[in-house]
Amino acid sequence: MVSQKREIPLTLAPPLNPSLLHLSDEERDFLHAVITPNDEELRARILNIQKRAYEKYPYPCIRAFHFVNLMMTANAIYPTVLEAGKKGDSLFLDLGCCMGTDVRKLVYDGYPASRVLGCDLRPEYIQLGYELFGDADGSPIHFFASDVFDLSTDLQHTQGDTAPPRDPATVTDLSQLRGALTHIYAGALFHLFDEETQRELAVRLVTLLRRGPGAIIFGRHQGLREEGYIKDHLSRRRYGHSEKSWAHLWKSIFKEAEGEAFAERVVVQATLREQFAPHVFDTETPTYMLYWSVQII
């Protein structure tokens, strides 16, 4: 059973804290190149966008300025994805793209823009991304709003069941991408849900994947050393996978979809990192993030 995430009442959300804005050299160089070389102008634009986003949806990741951090590039499989994209015959989706910083960096690094899609449940985030980057009329990346939980969970499709979109720029719903994607990124998404809903989400991603050699699903989200429910400061029911349980989840889904022999060709990498100090999310302990990839070989 799918359990949709609860909205956070603004009364429970901690106030914004500008001191949480920290940019790495790579992030600063990228934002200077694509937004403005002026530090003061860049900071002012980021703070303005953050304020407006937080008023609408007061999520911890918005408060922590993760919408301008480069999370995708920190995944060990990123260079593999990038090089595959440059070779062609690929189609990339960032699911839960927020304001689209990661996919804009992906294109900046050389992945063909015409083969990159960004999707978020919140069209407001997509619009704020256009305002942040100033490219509403010129972004080469196609962004659209759609709900992944509207997708069917039927895993029993064979290659070629659904014709891939001839022009990715015409896609308006995730259902149009069934069996079409070579690369899927899901950053800071799975940890929003309970255990059963995380499995339901993973199943839906597998239905979107072109299940051939080289296909990759990857991402990052909060995890735990030992799987179990996360102690959530906003009283949300969220599950945290361990490195071991995360690999087991994906293996079991591919076994169900394609059989045991196919599942043996699925390589799951998962690494848990201590990443955020308690003050970032107003927690009692540091936050651990699971960086992971699922690759068909």
Image (spheres, rainbow, N blue to C red):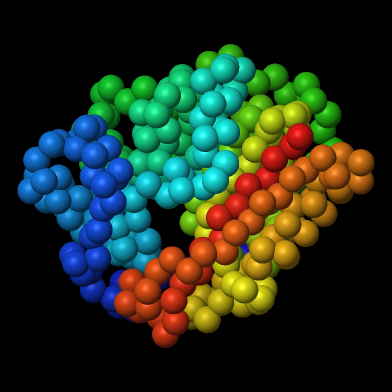
Q: Nearest the camera: 115 or 292?
A: 292
Q: Nearest the camera: 193 or 105?
A: 105
Seen in the picture, residue 246 relative to 45 is either above or below; the reply is below
Seen in the picture, residue 224 relative to 140 is either above or below; the reply is below
As drawn, the residue found furthest toward the top would be 166
Q: Position of residue 32 (x, y in %)?
A: 19, 37
Q: Is residue 124 visible?
A: no
Apparent side of residue 10 relative to residue 208 in the rendered image (left or right): left
Residue located 57% across and 64% down the image: 272
Q: Is residue 272 visible?
A: yes
Apparent side of residue 159 relative to residue 63 in the rendered image (left or right): right
Q: Position of residue 201 (x, y in %)?
A: 65, 53
Residue 247 lies in quadrant: bottom right
Q: Quadrant of the N terminus?
A: bottom right
Apparent side of residue 76 relative to residue 35 in the rendered image (left or right): right
Residue located 11% across and 51% down the image: 44
Q: Nearest the camera: 75 or 236?
A: 75
Q: Position of residue 274 (x, y in %)?
A: 48, 69
Q: Position of residue 231 (x, y in %)?
A: 52, 81
Give the total of numbered labels.
0
Residue located 82% across and 54% down the image: 252
As drawn, the residue found furthest toward the bottom would be 284
Apparent side of residue 98 relative to residue 254 in the rendered image (left or right): left
Residue 244 lies in quadrant: bottom right
Residue located 61% across and 17% down the image: 89
Q: Quadrant of the C terminus?
A: top right
